[in-house]
Image (cartoon, helix red, strand yellow):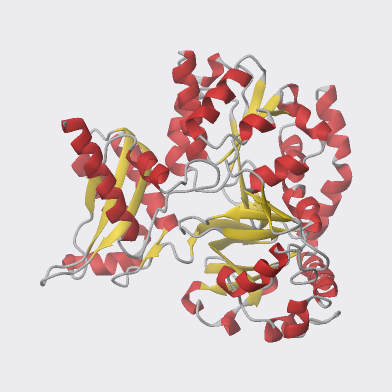
Amino acid sequence: MPLLNKIVSIYFTSRRRQIDRFMREPGRVQDEQLAGLVSKGASTDYGKRYGISQGMSPAEFAARLPVTDYEDLTAYIDRAKQGEADVLWPGTVKWFAKSSGTTGSRSKFIPVTAEGLDGCHFQGPRDVVAFFTAAYPKSRVFKGKTLTLGGSKRIEKEGETALSGDLSAILIENTPGLANIRRVPSAKTALIPDFDRKVEMICKETVDQNVTSFAGVPSWNLVMLNRILEITGKKNVLEIWPDMELFIHGGMNFKPYRSQYHRIIPSADMKYMETYNASEGFFAIADDPMRDDMLLMLDYGIYYEFIPMNSIGNSAAAVPLEGVKTGVNYAMLISTANGLWRYMLGDTVEFTSLSPYRIRITGRTRHYINAFGEEVVIENAESAIQEASILTDAQISEYTVAPVYMESGSKGAHQWVVEFSKPPVDTAKFRRVLDDTLRRINSDYDAKRTNDSTLEAPQLDIVPPGTFYRWMEEQGKVGGQNKVPRLYNDRTYVDRLMAVAARMAEEVAV
């Protein structure tokens, strides 16, 4: 083991013992998290309204507090944003992570407290390093620097005392100076609002440095890396950074992008490590390189509850961690040291293991298609698009899916709008594999497709390169944690996207 790796490993010895404890005693650790949260929440306006009291049991907590979403907490957050103290969390909150969510056009301001920053948002990345050193003791990754592609929402003043920006900007502002030594690009470049300009400056600042890892959302990092290859005239990333070894990714399913990353980083030593984090908190890490799921992190100042998706409107169906089962699609509720109480995050997860608790993200509570009773979730779509790509030698840039409604006696269907970086060798086969895979893995979809009883075969619309980028750009959602909605239960997004594609076709014709 290299000396630097040994030093890093020794540094994290104590932390690994803490992780071992919550893996062995998850119920006790979660009870401790709840006890810490309610002891703080009891003195807040929100806590007084709903009877949060020190020492209350999980059952009392669930009985007294309502399940919430951002709309339910908006009035409280607005008060905290104006500098009022003790609203959702003791004291005043200085930082608010500005996020539009995955698809919404209205900005959300997620409170980020001092406890939430250190105990959750910063603890997650520290634990990534702890897991990585344990799994790869001979890695060379610590010899170089980490390239981070953050968002572009600069820090802005809110009210008299509060500041807002996207989470990456807040983390940059609060990262200790010593930690910045290993990070590129500079803070000034990382927060350039114009995405294309930012990528150009990242290229200028980093091509002569020894970058050994990078982190961020797969789609935007792929755009960045391809642009850097274009600027430098290199064929692959290793010609620029020969010691590149690790991509820490999150924010979306990596499967559709895996083959493209393998193409531009052709190294058998390259490692990919998934994390599950958002403006609301840091939740899980892929700790075991031999698995495709993530360890749920239980001591980040977060208390978890879960509602089965088939009972999504029934808050009484929520169960604590010890009540979950494998193979069930759950909506996740979080109560956190950032002042979110029984907050429905919007993500759906499935437990793959109960000892320890491991999860896989399956989609979004609002990002699904169930227009005809087919109950297709993102995990289904990702599996289908990956299978179709493999069997037709295709590579996906972006895609989205929407229902095609029944009209004038016609049957329904799904419209897949896909942008390829490498088109399929057989488009008809690609469409057929999409359909066949969905039928194999989703019995509800299969039932609706049997004899075309309710659903006809899916439609496939291939749009020109750059269509999705133009679409996101027109919505002001380029870069950062902005993501293309993979599934939506109406045609709001796909109709706008197809309008962009039509305009681009007209421009080419002219």
The image shows residue 330, relative to residue 262, as above or below, that is below
Give percent across and percent down for residue 200: 52, 23
Give percent across and percent down for residue 464: 27, 36
The picture quadrant where one finds residue 9 is top right
Q: Residue at x 38, y 57 (%)?
A: 487
Q: Which quadrant is home to the N terminus? A: top right
The picture quadrant where one finds residue 175 is top right
**Left of 218 or right of it: where is 304?**
right
**Left of 273 or right of it: where is 411?**
left
Q: Residue at x 41, y 45 (%)?
A: 472
- Residue 394 appearing in the image: no
The image shows residue 347, relative to residue 185, as above or below, that is below
Q: Residue at x 60, y 58 (%)?
A: 359
**Left of 465 or right of it: where is 321?**
right
The image shows residue 475, relative to residue 307, as above or below, that is above
Give percent across and percent down for residue 149: 59, 35
